[in-house]
Image (cartoon, rainbow, N blue to C red):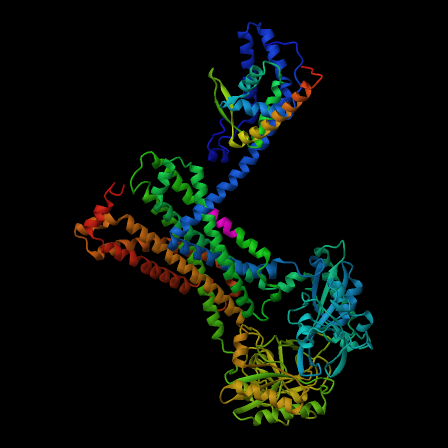
Amino acid sequence: MSDRTPRRLRYFGIVRPDVPADVDDELSFHIQMRIDRNLALGLTPDEARRDAVERFGDVAVVRSALVRHDQRQHAGERRAEWVADVVQDLRFGWRALRRAPAFTIAAALTLALGIGANTAIFSVLNAVVLQPLPYAHPDRLVTLGQGSSGEYLALRDRLRTVTDLAEWVPTTDPVDDGRDALRLTGVAVTPNLMPLLGVAPMLGRGFAPSEGTPGGDHVVVLSFATWRSQFGGARDVVGRKVTLEGLPYSVIGVMPPSFRYPRADVQYWMPYVIDPKNIGLMWGVGGKEFVGRLAPNATLDQARREVHTVWPSLRTLNPVWDPGAGYRRDATATPLKSDVVGASGPLLWMLFGATLLVLLIACVNVANLLLARATARERDLTVRAALGGGRGRLMRQLMTEGVLLAMIGAAAGAAIAVLTVRAVVAAVPTGLPRANEISVSGVVLAFALVTSMGTGIVFSVVPALRATSAAARASGSMLGRRGWGSRSHTRVSGWLVGGEIALAVMLVVGSLLLVRSFAALRSIEPGFDPTHVIAARISAPEATYAPGTERLATFYAEVLDRARAMPGVSDAALVDQLSLAAPLQGLAIRVHGQYEDVTRQLPFIDHVQTVSPEYFATMGIPLVRGRAFTDDDRAGQPPVAIVSQSVARKFWPSGDAVGQRIGYPYESPWFTVVGIVPDTKQDSLRDTSNVTIYMPWSQRTQKVGSELWLVARATGDPRAAGAQIRRIVHDIDRGVPVSDVRTMDDVVSGSVVGARLTAALVTAFALVALALGAVGIFGVMSYVVSERRHEMGLRIALGASAGAVVNLIVGRALRLAAVGTVAGLACAFIAMRPLQRWLYGVSPMDPVTYAGVSIVFAVVALVASYVPARRAARANPASAMRDAAPGAGA
Amino acid sequence: MPTSREPGDLLQGTLRILILKSLLLGRAHGYAISRWIEDTTGDVLRIEEGSLYPALRRLQDRGLVTSEWGVSENNRRARYYTITRAGRAVLRAEASIWLEYSRAVARVLRAEPSLA
């Protein structure tokens, strides 16, 4: 083999130097020459050979040394050549891209949109779903659901598959840090929670076991964010006093920024004090979350089975009441992560699927552009092939160009992703779990890089293969401009655009379904009139304003009086749980004459609101029957209640609910139903359970703290009233914080923010897909027109009208769109089924949506092909035919 | 040619000079180089011919010679070596040192009492 073997041949491994054979050639030549000379000098063949070998020395040693040397040298050369080739390809590719700026910008922008959307959603998916929770061995953590402290202690002692179990309960407490009255969101936790999760405070210490028992010190651990915002990040914060619920607490530690258990908005942790002597509290109050760590050799399945058998067996332990035969039959253990991620997991996977479709469409579009470009450069490639540019070399060149293009797209896409992720995180302040962990990390950028590299390679290989095979075929004959089958290009492009349209159709169908279901959701009447109503949370500290005290009643009476006296306010009222702000707490009840035995299972009322008399007037809830509460319905008077129509229908379907009696789930005085109001939406607009019982605040002290919402109906803009509410509360007692001042309109739309965000995101993706589809149709039609100009010219010369030519082109585009649309609708019909869980009031097979999408794509095809069609119709017959004459351009 | 004389002791550097010098006449294959050395020195400086090739590789690595495949005078495939510009420069520098050295040694040997 010659040293001058063309480099590209050796690079592609077509011709590799055979080093040992070359060395043998060289050495045997030497020895043979010496033998020849010796023979010429008259030696016998034997002598001649012996002398030659003797003069040479040890042939084997020399040979192996040379082989070793040469092999090393060739390897080095190949590496150097490869690098040089890549650099050359990149330089050449960059020049080629700069020569066609319109193509480059179009392709890079397309890819940037696809990669950007994909990377943005992947960042969210990665942070929320894929990344492990920031705790020690997070896969060993489980939640058991909610229960009472009595159940907690019993489970902790009995479960063998769970080594450690902690309980926690949210506490939202008025906090006075010495400057302002604040309402902070905290969690009361058993002292073992943080060691169980495997996270230590960054400053100070965690809770001692004694701090979780009665009589322990009042201590609090701050979140990193609270430490920074409320205490200026002071290192000496440990040991300082803060006032929680009017009581002094010592700060004992600060958690690291990554620790946000159980939610991102937690501002402090305090020990949950379990008092086994308080039987009622131990067994009567549930709502505590249990989180545990699996025993070292236990599996999740074993834990599930054990919890499923052990928890129902606790039924007999309850000293307060018999919870019934169905008690905890559904008890199980859930991995902590799926509990934290919750419904966001499937949603994010769905969004990720949508962005994958966008990326796929972008890739198809770029492939089409590359194909058209390869066709346009066909002569250039033919010439290079004829001049000895090997096929492999040409392919590598085209692929390098594709990768280069993809890299530009990826850089722009990464920028888009960074901006989008910020927007997404800003748009979901609380709805998304682990939102604080979302960032465009190295993993995400690697994902973008790999995606774009793959895109660049895969979608330049097809055009490159076609172009180079064409070039190879044509290189001998140097055909003119029409060279290799432009028809076949059109056919491939047609398939690509058809596929692109099918993908876009799926996305548009999905987005329309989500938009329609969001509209359906928004059109649901909440049952109250939210316009002109403002709500504000007033958190009276329990230490100064204990529940059920005269002082608390006086305070809120004063607030209510002053609120009603505010200019521009027509009505004001108090309520303990605001509708549509957060899921409401419910209550099991006795019903006179139907469910009176407290040892049996009692009916559960999902929503119980404790209100002041003006609540119904303020919220615009009309009375169906009976009367509203009055100021006379106060403590010491006969207890009264108002029920929603569903409650009335449920318990007294034939008779009149007014005058009937209900009660707390234990022996206590009966409440008389005095009025019936329409059903209202309480937890969300999608509520299916509309049972609500209202009780007068002045008569109800059970389970109601000192924190209430003030709702006020304004005659004008309710926002102005919001600022006034803060002022009047501050005037009465500057130690009472006012928070979450929001109009009811905002509260209502806030309750569907998730649906709106989903619809908005998918719609954005669908619009991108639609735009790319339109560009695809436009591109392929433009190409068809330019290819068939002489045919068009001929038709016009033969008397075809401009209209007929336009029809021809537009008709072809419509056929293309029709095929793509039908394929896309068929795919959507199957693919949209999983969308069901996010839809409301619309079927995944909604015919209106499918018909609408068909029309949209017909219009898009019409518009996108009209411009090229007009161009074809304007073709000057003479010049079109002359330009297109075979060989004319060669 | 068969000979009974012991082969001369050749230093590495001497072989380098001999090879480079032989290539001044034009490109040559390994056998031609060994023949040129043999003929020019009247078979005084006998080299082990096998050592020629590693030496050529070393010269090639340093960029003092290049090689290419060609066809020999008797129509056989042979590897030809050519001296480079750098090779000439090295040869010039080493030759002047060598000449100075050998002159100095000659002067010593001719000094009284002369051995020559």
Q: Is residue A313 left or right of residue B2?
A: right
Q: Is residue A247 above or below residue B59?
A: below
Residue A264 falls within the magenta-colored stretch: no
**Which of A714/A614 is in front?**
A714
Q: Can residue A843 be seen by looking at this rendering?
A: no
Residue A233, given in percent of the width and then of the height, sits at: 69, 73
Residue A30, given in percent of the width and then of the height, sits at: 55, 17
Residue A360, given in percent of the width and then of the height, sits at: 46, 53
Magenta-colored span = A451-461
Name which residue lies at 64% across and 64% down. A340
Q: Can residue A41 be seen by looking at this rendering?
A: yes
Q: Main secondary structure of the magenta part?
A: helix
**Which of A675/B64 is in front?**
B64
Residue A456 falls within the magenta-colored stretch: yes
Quadrant showing the C terminus of chain A:
top left
Q: Is residue B83 left or right of residue A479?
A: right
> Residue A802 falls in which quadrant of the image?
bottom left
Count of numbered tags: 0
> Residue A281 falls in which quadrant of the image?
bottom right
Residue A376, given in percent of the width and then of the height, sits at: 34, 46
